[in-house]
Amino acid sequence: MIQVSHLTKLYGPRAAVRDLSFEVNQGEIVGFLGPNGAGKSTTMKILTGFMPASDGKASICGYDVFEQPLEVKRNVGFLPETPPVYPEMSVYDYLEFSARLHQVPKLQVSTAVNTVIDKVALGEVRKRLIGNLSKGYRQRVGLAQSLVHNPKVLILDEPTVGLDPKQIIEIRELIKSLSGDHTVILSSHILPEVTATCQRIIVINKGQIVAEDTLEHLTARMKKGLIYSMVVKNPSKEGLESLRKMDGISQVTAHGSKLAIEMKSGTPEIRDKIIEMAVQRSMGVLEFSVEKISLEEIFLQLTTIETSSQPASHSADHSQGAGV
Amino acid sequence: MKISLRNIWTIAGRDFKTYFTSPIAYIVIAGFMVIMGWMFFFNLSHFNMQNMQYQQFNMGKGVSITEGIIRPLYGNMNVIFLFLVPFITMRLFAEEKKLHTIELLMTSPVQLSEIILGKFFSSFLLVSIMLVLTGVYPIVLFATGNPELGPIVTSYIGTLLLSSCYLSIGILFSSVTENQIVAGALTFAAGLFFWLVSWATQSAGPVWGELLTYLSLISHYNNFGQGLLNTSDIAFYLSFIGLGLFLTHRVLDSFRWR
């Protein structure tokens, strides 16, 4: 559906995107992940025909982005970083304008607009001026705009930025429901965003792809060993010492009453033994859980230049933060 | 590539409506009508006084309506458009850039030339409405006197063409910046320059003088004011408009490459 090969975009001597190649299949939701300034927006602007690339090729639905921009634009819905809305227009008028701009046939315009208003739940504000709407609603109007002509490909640049948690969940559900019929690329620098919606993740940093895989594979690949998290009533020194001495445990870190127990890779199942030990040392086990390596760490590991293998000692705190 | 009228109309329609959902159209039209009304009244009473004096002192044939009212009235109208057009055009692209809505236009299956023509026609329509409203003066003249129709028609054609030149300058400068004030100021300055450029003809020597006269927007209007349609004047105005819109196209296209 989307093919990008050796895409390069230079701003003067600085490359915003360098030799980027990837593919997206029909019906897939792909997440573009990267820190600010990694080249996500640039790539999206090139794909949507907003700006030309300095080098390389890109095609959408079989049409070359540079050779046949109008055909590409007809098949693509784009939500830029800042929703491109006119504050002085009402939601309905704006979507109607957008539908006509995308050459929805005259007789189908009002149906298309009403459908998209229902889909994005804008019914309450359809007559209101966009300028008077909250950031969240504006974002949704922007999303509705990208959907109104029912495009095959959706390109969403940070679609949930500025929304409250409830709205974020709604938008995520909406995006998920689009998969199958639509091919979606969305970008984010927020990790849970991508974890929650995307089937495949492309991590870019400094204009280059540093990883491209499914979430599970990425996690597996980056896993440096399993981590258990244990909350105890009494994190005594000798208790910690004896845990550290156990076979298969590489490190135990305590943050107050919360212990992060890092296993050596390839260790057999010894959870029961760990708990037994904790009970023997009368540490008072309150909680025991398996800590997944969070995407945030993968992200950090991939985007910070491989400076030794970072111990995942801080994982317990971080991964919980990322799980929101 | 084929240009689609529907696309142009979609864009022109939205921009035209925006003039009326914001105060711009009302302020510009009201200001225009007040000034024009005053000028018409002034011209008319001056004309009456002059003709009365001619009759009183038996100085022969008085000044014709065309010479005494039509020419100064529409000549002044051109000056007023020079002042008002920047307010009409300054937002056309500058605002789109500021609001990032230019991204919507540029990623829609619409050609850049259609966008520019749409913007041009939205402002052209507003200027046309302003001109239609001034139709009340010829009506008054026809009701009370016996003016020539020809000069009135050519004055309207000339004024529409001349103000379209200002519009194309305005659209060009609006595409250069995302600051509306800057766009408006540049438009006014450039409009004034092309208007006053003929002032230097006397001191510029024969070749340059002729060139400067040719370049001056206002010197091409003189024939229209006298009831003459001259193809070279029409061609000049049309190429001026075309050049302005073409440069706008280049500016916006190069803006993408940066």
Image: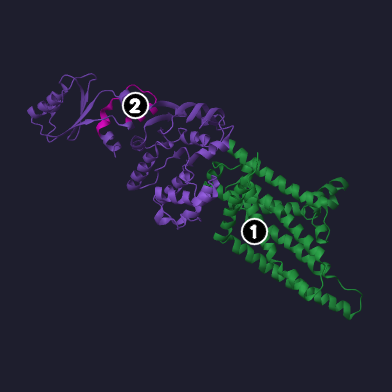
| Residue at left offset 59%, top offset 35% | B257
Pointer 2 with pointer 1, Cβ within 8 A:
no
Q: Which residues, given as a range, are shown in magenta?
A: A297-316
Q: What residue type is disc 1 on?
A: Leu
Q: Colour of chain B?
A: green
Q: Dot 1 lies on which element? A: helix
Residue B237 can be seen in this image: yes
Relative placement, left or right, of B189 versus A180 is: right
Q: CA distance from mark 2 to mark 1?
A: 59 Å
Chain identifier of the residue bearing label 1 in the image = B
Chain identifier of the residue bearing label 2 in the image = A
Q: Which residue is mark 2?
A: A218
Q: Colour of chain A?
A: purple
| Residue at left offset 44%, top offset 32% | A26
Q: In the image as oriented, which residue stretches furthest toward the front?
A: A107
Q: Nearer the viewer, residue A120 or A258?
A: A120
Relative placement, left or right, of A174 versus B15 is: left
Q: What residue type is disc 2 on?
A: Leu
Check residue B126 in the rendering and tell me which mark sits there, or answer none.
1
Residue A285, image quadrant = top left
Q: How many neighbours does mark 2 have within 10 angstroms: few (below 14), some (14-19), or many (20 or more)?
A: some
Coordinates of residue A212 in the picture (x, y in percent): 40, 26
Do the residues marked 2 and 1 share a common chain?
no
| Residue at left offset 83%, top offset 51% | B201
- Asked whether B192 falls inside the magenta stretch, the response is no
Magenta region, main secondary structure: helix
Give the position of the C terminus of chain A as an image quadrant.
Answer: top left
Q: Dot 2 lies on which element? A: helix
